[in-house]
Image (tube, rainbow, N blue to C red):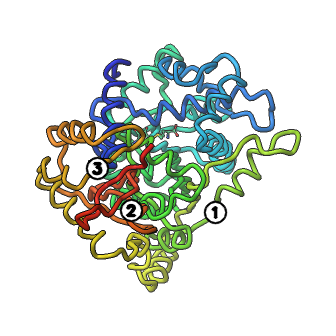
Amino acid sequence: MRTRHSLSRTTAFAALLLVLFGVAPTLAVEKGQTSYTAEAVCAFRSIAALDPDPKTRNPDTLAKHFVNPEMVGRFPGLGLAFDPAKVAIDTMDNGVFYYVNARTHHMDRLLTKALDEGVTQVVIMGAGFDSRAYRFHDKYPQVRFFEIDLPATSADKQQRVKKILGKTPDWVTFTPIDFNTQTLDEVLTKAGFAKNKKTFFVWEGVTYFISREAVQSTLDFIARNTAPGSRVVFDYMLEDVVSGADYSPYGSRRTVFFVSTRSEPYVFGLQPRYFETFVQQRGLKALSDLGPAQLSDRYLIDSQGKPRGKIAEFLRIAEVEVPPPVERQALINRATGKPVSAINASLQHRVPIPDDVQALLDRHTQFFKAKDLDAVMTNYSDRYSNNGRRKDMVEAFIANAFRRANFEHFQVVVTRFKQEGDMARIDGFVDRKAFRSPLVITHIRKEADGKWRWYGNQR
Ligand SMILES: C[S@@+](CC[C@H](N)C(=O)[O-])C[C@H]1O[C@@H](n2cnc3c(N)ncnc32)[C@H](O)[C@@H]1O
């Protein structure tokens, strides 16, 4: 596991890059490192499990054993008391803590239903520090669990399990996978997965970190290779948030920015109105698709009848089922009749902007691709200031970025534009092909020579 020192240095560098250009230096969980987001949501569950109100308390009673002690520094009171930890959580003001709490409740409920109906095979995909294999064992001892995750996180999880239980449990099989480069077929078949058994798949907090192709091929495999009646519960992110077209859903902008600084940017999203078509195209039947209001009403209302906190609004939880083979083909036929292109339509959220503003963005793109520092700096006003950072500081950071990162694919895409005189505010994202990050410098100014330049927020 990363040391605290190197973690904070890497994070600080990544955060600075993002603040300056909307650039994250790597594309996924760093090789050999435990997933930071897996640690964070485990910490959230351990805090929510201390909730004095039994109605909203998180059912993950084992999260406190899995939690990384390094997280205690981030959330004072973690493992000790609910109230001080909640104060720290609420200052983050993004609603993810409450979303994660609702998610545990909901996914536990669906898993319980499946196990009560007789399912004996469960696959936890992108398992992180999910404790269900251990929490549900006593009541359902006949169930075999497969936990699959990136190799480093999977290895770390196994060590923690061994420490907590004193042994590696014989009802759990750990299998490494990288969804972006491997198929479920490759890893599950070798691990002893029984294709003929009705299976419950938990895919919690994962789809948005992997490519569209990886999401599709995983669902395709499940639809074709598991017994009818098998189900998958998974959550997904709103596509307009991932694409940078709309950060108005509560908590989205802060969270997108935050995860990018942790080298785990969001790359995949779906539009809820195309959710059903999307899963039908894979040959799966949509059972439910819950948004923030439904999740909050079901799981976050405390004993006084009040919401425990404000839930993040940019994530949804879906459940789908594998139909019998004949029905599967009918679903695919029906769904593919709909224009597939519409599903990706939201990626075209560019708004029209004046030609001379476009010229600034074109110059910027071209100079970044060429890593031409002097030229890039001509796009910054001499009076540039962004949260106290001046032009010379920007120059030092860009120089650093050019040494470390690849800018072959770099494009500023504008999704909102508002001009008042010689000042304008632009909003959007930096497209790095494999992922997008919010545009953080949003003000430009037309200077005496008639050219637009980055002006910062002047704070
Ligand atoms: C937010 S964590 C969720 C962990 C766990 N499911 C939970 O809810 O506590 C995201 C998980 O996705 C996994 N992940 C990210 N990219 C992946 C990939 N390409 N292949 C496999 N797993 C991946 C991470 O290792 C991490 O465990």
Displayed quadrant of residue 422: bottom left
- Mark 2 vs 1: CB contact within 8 A: no
- The residue wearing badge 2 is 216
Give the numbered dot on residue 451: none
Residue at the spot of label 3: 182
Q: Where does residue 48 sit, x and y in percent of width and height?
A: 67, 31
Q: Earlier in the sequence, mark 3 or mark 1?
A: 3
Badge 1 is on which residue?
Answer: 288
Kind of residue indicated by mark 3: Gln
Q: Is residue 240 above or below residue 234?
A: below
Quarter holding the N terminus is top left
Which quarter shows the C terminus? Answer: top left
Q: Marks 2 and 1, Cα distance to the nearest angstrom?
A: 18 Å
Picture layout, residue 154 above or below residue 148: above
Question: Is residue 176 in view?
Answer: no
Q: Badge 1 local density, few (<14 within 10 Å), some, or many (20+)?
A: few
Q: Which kind of residue does numbered mark 2 sit on?
A: Gln
Residue 283 at what x, y percent from top left? Answer: 46, 70
Q: Residue furthest right?
A: 304
